[in-house]
Image (tube, rainbow, N blue to C red):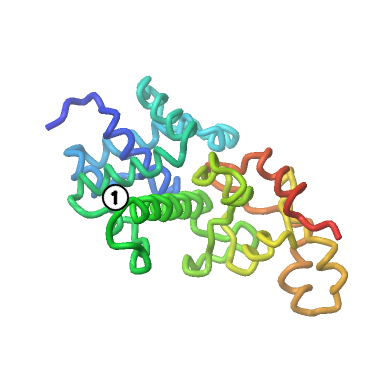
Amino acid sequence: MPSNKWSREELILAFNLYCKIPFGTIHIHNPKIISLAKILGRTPSAVSWKLANFARLDPSLQNRNIAGASHGSKLDVEVWEEFNHDWEKLGFESEKLLAEKIGKRIEAITDIETDDLPKVGEERESMVKVRVNQSFFRKSVLAAYNFQCCITGLAIPEMLNASHIVPWSKDNVNRVNPRNGLCLNVFHDRAFDRGLMTITTDFTVRISPVVHKISKDPFAVEFLLKFNGQPIQQPERFAPNIDFIKYHNKNIYRRE
């Protein structure tokens, strides 16, 4: 049995799970918490408490006056800061570590597609890392929004995307940062990506004038224009970074 003191590796695995399950499911009966507890040789109570320790560091929860568990360790803070300093590195490291603990390949535990990849070599490894991080980003963003589209409330996971606010190709540092993501249904994801809509800094939907010009189209009215000015459902954690929103407003959103 491990000592009561948590190691860095254990905390990385705990934070990985913290990112990938909704905040409201942090409790001892959650099967994913029970599973991680078995991997670590700890109790579900200890794991759920550690996840609650991380919650106390989350600014999004603090803004909602949710304190999380108290009496966390200095190492909790260090791991939190490691992730937030380099999401791409720590996201992959945490998934790799989890795969090693389970005794499976990282491709298997992250459910990524590999049929189109080279069988071996550096190119395969590089592409696997990208897809693992994309999977981590998706799971983190969807969990933050409780698996619901932030505009429509649609709750069918197969119809939801983790939409980058600053596009993947434009910001290497924040590709995996969940604060650079919105949970959108596939239709509004496409509209957001093409600049036909944006989110303002007060978290409301703004539809592009391009769409207003074809406002006689009943489909455009029903699925886009009626949401203009509507507040989005904000996430339980990892609230969108305002600077990222400003970037989308300025560089992606179409004003004409």
The quarter of the picture where residue 187 lies is bottom right
Residue most toward the top? 74
Instruction: Indicate left or right for 238 with 101 as reference.
Output: right
Characterize the local packing of mark 1: few (<14), some (14-19) or many (20 or more) Cα atoms within 10 angstroms.
few
Which residue is nearer to you in this view: 256 or 58?
A: 256
Instruction: Indicate left or right for 54 with 173 as reference.
Output: left
Assign a secondary structure to mark 1. loop
Instruction: Indicate left or right for 161 with 227 as reference.
Output: left
Looking at the picture, how far across and down is residue 31, in whole percent?
A: 28, 53
Q: Is residue 21 visible?
A: no
| Relative height, residue 21 to residue 65 (above, below) | below
Q: Is residue 6 visible?
A: yes
Which residue is nearer to you in this view: 87 or 140?
A: 87
Looking at the picture, how far across and down is residue 189, in whole percent?
A: 62, 63
Where's the C terminus, which quadrant? bottom right
Query: How many numbered circles does the render carry?
Result: 1
The amino acid on which the numbered mark 1 sits, given as a three-letter code, is His
Which residue is nearer to you in this view: 150 or 49?
A: 150
Which residue corresponds to the image point at 75% horizontal and 62% vertical from the top-left?
A: 196
Which residue corresponds to the image point at 54% horizontal and 39% vertical from the top-left?
A: 173
Instruction: Indicate left or right for 108 with 163 as reference.
Output: left
The quarter of the picture where residue 247 lies is top right
Which residue corresponds to the image point at 81% horizontal and 68% vertical from the top-left?
A: 211
Residue carrying label 1: 29
Where's the N terminus, which quadrant? top left
Looking at the picture, how far across and down is residue 39, in whole percent?
A: 20, 44
